[in-house]
Amino acid sequence: MIIKNPLKQTQYKSRLGMEVLPGCNLLHLTDSQRHELKQSLWEHGVIVVKNQQLTASELEEFAIKTFGNLMFGGNSFSLDPDLPPDIQSQYTAILGNPKGFDQEPPEKIYGARVWHQDKDGVPRREELDMNALYVVMLYTIKVPEEGENGQPHTTEYLDLVEAYNNLDPSYQKELEGISMYQMPPMFDRQNLDWDDVPKKVHPIVSTHKVTGQKGLYLGSWNTAIPLGMEDKREEAKQYWQDLFQTVLKRTPVYSHVWEPGDIIFWDNSQVMHRGTFYDSTKYQRIGLRLGVVDCQ
């Protein structure tokens, strides 16, 4: 475990990143083990199961048995004849550079490498509210030998329950009176009219559906607009950035150091995350990502 925060040098133990069910095979869990996994996820926000060997289809099978069949992806992931069939399925996205080294390194800051919550897809689903228990599973098959600056390759997580608890009581009270529109990322990339954008309103201070804990729900800088700032987009982005910088200064970052066979689960009701850079011209990364809404 790596904890990063330049403003906090004291000893710190994050609730995020707990290892669960050591020695298990996710394909052969008992009902009791599935319950244990889910309760650990709601309690800790981010959990990891290590030493797994699954195909993409088996990952889907596990997700349906454990959380339900409300998965994001649809038919958008068609089979690629240039990739092994074991790492492909209808709902599973392949992350990294599975076809080998890239000719040129990608930009360091884009998409998943900025802080965000994966609930950006929820506004497109009428039957879901923004408090839906949207869980993401990321399974690493191949891990780069190093990430940035010679350090291990990681994904970073920010605990939004702790973030709320670390705010001054007066600021907590202020935020409890503010809600935001939440929209899909396409809103920022396409020239769409406001009325044509899927969006839902959600309070900044969220109450978790299972634990009842209060935490922040921030979305991401280009998908969240406070009510009343619909026509003030630059002001809305600045408001989000100022709020997020306050949160980041007061909340340590948990970095998960990847090993092959890790499956990390995170509850987007409680955490933000971002990927970190690695040199894809020198190293290969293969990860399988699957998102599912827990149907309880």
Image (cartoon, grey):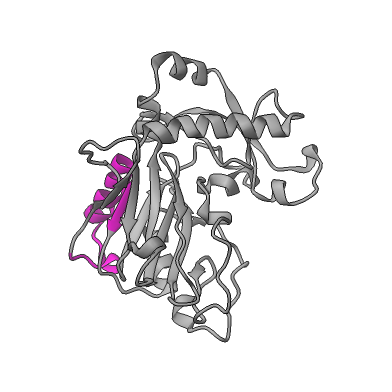
Is 62 situated left or right of 226 in this image? left
Q: Which quadrant: the C terminus?
A: top left
Side (left or right) of 76 relative to 139: right
Magenta segment, which residues?
Answer: 23-48
Residue furthest to the top in view is 170
Q: Is residue 240 visible?
A: yes
Given residues 101 and 25, the one toward you in this image is: 101
Q: Position of residue 134 (x, y in %)?
A: 47, 47
Q: Position of residue 29 (x, y in %)?
A: 25, 62
From this view, report whether residue 278 is shown above or below residue 6: below
Query: In this orientation, which residue lies closer to the viewer: 138 or 77?
Result: 138
Against 8, is 105 above or below? Answer: below
**Secondary structure mostly seen in the magenta stretch:** helix
Looking at the image, is 111 positioned above or below residue 233? below
User: Based on the displayed image, in which of its 4 quarters is residue 8 positioned?
Assistant: top left
Q: Residue furthest left?
A: 23
Say which residue appears at 43% left-offset and 69% top-offset.
287
Residue 62 seen in the figure: no
Q: Position of residue 264 (x, y in %)?
A: 35, 57
Residue at 63% over, 42% down: 222
Q: Is residue 207 highlighted in magenta? A: no
**Does 262 appear above or below 125?**
below
What x and y, as percent, mark residue 177?
54, 17
Q: Is residue 194 left or right of residue 110?
A: right
Query: How many numbered marks, from 0 up?
Result: 0
Asked which quadrant contains residue 235, the reply is top right
Q: 32 or 168: which is nearer to us?
A: 168
Residue occupying image coordinates x 50% and y 34%? 244
Name the residue located 59 percent from the left edge and 42 percent from the top edge.
127
